[in-house]
Amino acid sequence: MEKKNQLLHVAFIMDGNGRWAKARHLPRHLGHKEGCERIIDIYEECLALGIKVMSLYAFSTENWNRPKGEINHLFRYLDIFFKREIDRMVKDGCSVVISGDISKLPVKTQKTLQKSIELTKNNTRFYFNICLNYGGKDELVRAAKLFAQDVKDGKKEIEDLNEKSFEDYLYTKGLPPVDLLIRTSGEMRTSNYLPWQLAYAEFIFPKTPWPDFTKEEFRKCLDIYYGRDRRFGGIKDE
Ligand code: IPE
Ligand code: IPE
Ligand code: MG
């Protein structure tokens, strides 16, 4: 397949863990456990393909509506994930980026995340952006407040704000826009994920639930992506 589209940034909404578990008569949290195993497979594939950034929706600002037990399991699996994988991420030249307010997470998970950021902060080969307690509306309101504060402090003029400079106030500062969004499990919505960054992304909605989303499934999505016409408001090349 001819790779006519560039692919710098791929974002995932890792959905369907609960339904995957339910279909196996397992508790929902075992779906999250299995889902965490897929993260590293897809990470490896992104690195192998020369992609620069992967973003993962791991916990939304709306996911606090879930039972406390499920939430605790989720953060525990993420803690285990980072403890297990951080050494290879360091070796791979991967930088861990967090999007979202992690101050509301269990202290243990916060510490693991802070350590992961610290250990990888100088890496530039690949960016692993994990969205935790992330909400797109929350991110935009936060950005507006940060800019307003800079104006108030005399560091910025209102005229300084434009589509480029606004990005400095987002969690994803410095990262390229999302080229491809993949949401597993067949749901066709963005659920408050990266509204700014997805403005010109291609969307693919595979039916596969996240715990079954293998490297092969990912490659099938990439074939679809490379076949798409991205026009960015222009017209197709003759
Ligand atoms: C996605 O799987 C994981 C998180 C939201 C953290 P779900 O838990 O939403 O799985 P379904 O959608 O209920 O199957
Ligand atoms: C979106 O999935 C959030 C994550 C995958 C972390 P949800 O399962 O929470 O979204 P809705 O409720 O179906 O929109
Ligand atoms: Mg879901």
Image (cartoon, rainbow, N blue to C red):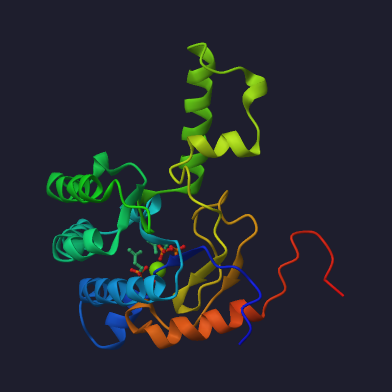
Q: Which quarter of the rendered picture does the C terminus lie within?
A: bottom right
Front residue of this view, candidates 151 and 93: 93
Q: Is residue 155 above or below residue 81?
A: above
Asked whether 66 or 47 is in front, the reply is 47
Residue at 50%, 36% (x, y): give it: 168
The location of residue 155, given as percent across then percent down, is 51, 16
Q: Is residue 177 left or right of residue 121?
A: right
Quarter occupied by residue 3:
bottom right
Q: Quadrant of ligand 2?
A: bottom left
Left or right: 182 as drawn, with respect to 85: right
Q: In the displayed structure, would residue 113 be above or below residue 87?
A: above
- Tell which of 2 and 197 is nearer to you: 2
Is 233 situated left or right of 118 in this image? right
Give the image quarter of residue 58. Answer: bottom left
- Across and down, in percent, residue 63 comes to 35, 56
In the displayed structure, 84 sits above or below 219; it is above
Quadrant containing the N terminus is bottom right
Q: How far across and how far down the image is residue 21, in percent?
A: 27, 81
